[in-house]
Amino acid sequence: MKKVLVLFAHPYFEYSQASQELVSVYTDSSVADFRDLYEDYPDFHIAAFRERKRLVNYDAVFFHFPMLWFGMPPLLKLWIDEVFDMQWVGKNERGLLENVDAYILVTVGGSEEDFSKDGAYEMSAENYLKNLQQSLKLTGVNLRKFITVYDADDPRPEKMLDVKREIGEILKRY
């Protein structure tokens, strides 16, 4: 049976209406293993060896997090720095991760207009997270989809339904 690892990293989860609603899709799925990095590593001491060993057993990884100051939450960044260590990546000649698919789901407080060329932030959320995309590429992981949930502080119910359906459809592939 194929499996999906959900790496959820939200330092203020209890205040996130959008993420609280979206998490139910993963927890209701039989193929998704939901991991809350802030619950697993409250001290920020990542067990990198254990995480690498675990990672190779999945067919797909969901990175679900809020954008904080135009980047990833600090614990997710640390997880990537330590788990995707360049020595491990360099030893990955056998292509341990080349058949792993990745999905990035980012929630942002701003509107879609804010994250446009002429908007307040002058570029897309996807462009602000190029470092994560490049890290995945270097490890051989295949980025399949980048999903941005705009206006996450006050999400529109119809938009949330669309995103939940999209996540559900992706999970059905595994």
Image: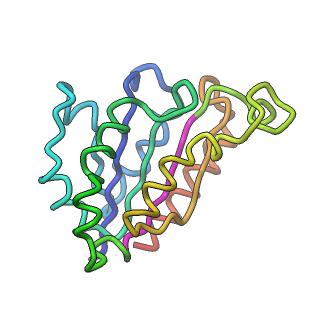
At horizontal 20% and vertical 33% (from top left) the residue drawn is 41
At horizontal 69% and vertical 27% (from top left) the residue drawn is 110
Whole-percent x and y of residue 62? 42, 54
Look at the image and tell me in which quarter the N terminus lies: bottom left
Residue 159 in which image quadrant: top right
Q: Nearer the viewer, residue 80 or 66?
A: 80
Whole-percent x and y of residue 35? 27, 45
- The image shows residue 170, relative to residue 167, as above or below, that is below
Q: Is residue 29 magenta?
A: no
- The image shows residue 133, relative to residue 76, as above or below, that is below
Q: Judge from the rendering whether residue 20 lies leftward or rightward of residue 33; answer left or right.
A: right
Q: Judge from the rendering whether residue 54 lies leftward or rightward of residue 171; answer left or right.
A: left
Look at the image and tell me in which quarter the C terminus lies: bottom left
Q: Is residue 103 magenta?
A: yes
Type of secondary structure dominating the magenta stretch? strand
Residue 101 in which image quadrant: bottom left
- The image shows residue 136, relative to residue 126, as above or below, that is below
| Model colouring | rainbow
Whole-percent x and y of residue 136? 43, 59
Whole-percent x and y of residue 161? 61, 47
Toward the right, the furthest residue is 118
Q: Magenta span covers which residues?
A: 99-107
At horizontal 42% and vertical 63% (from top left) the residue drawn is 138
Q: How many marks?
A: 0
